Image (spheres, rainbow, N blue to C red):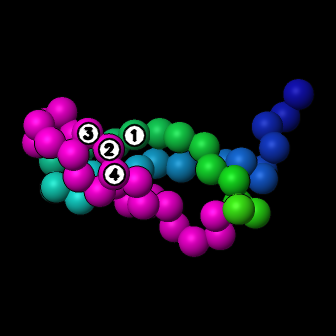
């Protein structure tokens, strides 16, 4: 069964410049803009914004 393209995989890259990446899914219908989440960056050892990259 193929994955639905309504919820694609996206990479969230740290804005701290460490290069740390989270991989998650997002709903294109509910979130048409690029996703920004505040998550923990273990290399920076603090919570930072993670922005979606394409």
Q: Whole-Å distance between the Cαs marked 4 and 3?
A: 7 Å
Mark 2 touches mark 1? (CB < 8 Å): yes
Q: Which residue is mark 2?
A: 39
* SS for dot 2: strand
Q: Earlier in the sequence, mark 4 or mark 1?
A: 1
The residue that appears at 23% across and 52% down in the rendered structure is 48
- Asked whether residue 22 is drawn in magenta, I would say no
Q: Whole-Å distance between the Cαs marked 3 and 1?
A: 10 Å
On residue 38, which mark appears? Answer: 4
Left or right of 21? Residue 31 is right
Q: Whole-Å distance between the Cαs marked 2 and 3?
A: 4 Å
Local crowd size for mark 4, using a 10 Å CA cut-off: few (<14), some (14–19), many (≥20): few
Using the image, determine if residue 16 lies above or below residue 32.
above
Looking at the picture, how far across and down is residue 15, in whole percent? Answer: 23, 59
Q: Which residue is mark 3?
A: 40
Q: Whole-Å distance between the Cαs marked 2 and 1?
A: 9 Å
Q: Which residue is mark 1?
A: 22
The residue that appears at 79% across and 37% down in the rendered structure is 3
Looking at the picture, how far across and down is residue 13, in whole percent? Answer: 33, 52
Q: Whole-Å distance between the Cαs marked 2 and 4?
A: 4 Å
Looking at the picture, how far across and down is residue 52, in whole percent? Answer: 45, 59
Left or right of 4? Residue 30 is left
Mark 4 touches mark 1? (CB < 8 Å): no
Local crowd size for mark 2, using a 10 Å CA cut-off: few (<14), some (14–19), many (≥20): some
Q: Which residues are magenta?
A: 31-54
* SS for dot 4: strand
């Amino acid at each position: 069964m193929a994955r639905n393209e309504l919820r694609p995989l996206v990479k969230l890259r740290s804005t701290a410049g460490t290069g740390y990446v989270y991989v998650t899914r997002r709903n294109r219908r509910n979130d048409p803009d690029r996703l920004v989440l505040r998550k923990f960056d273990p290399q920076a050892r603090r919570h930072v914004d993670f922005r979606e990259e394409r």
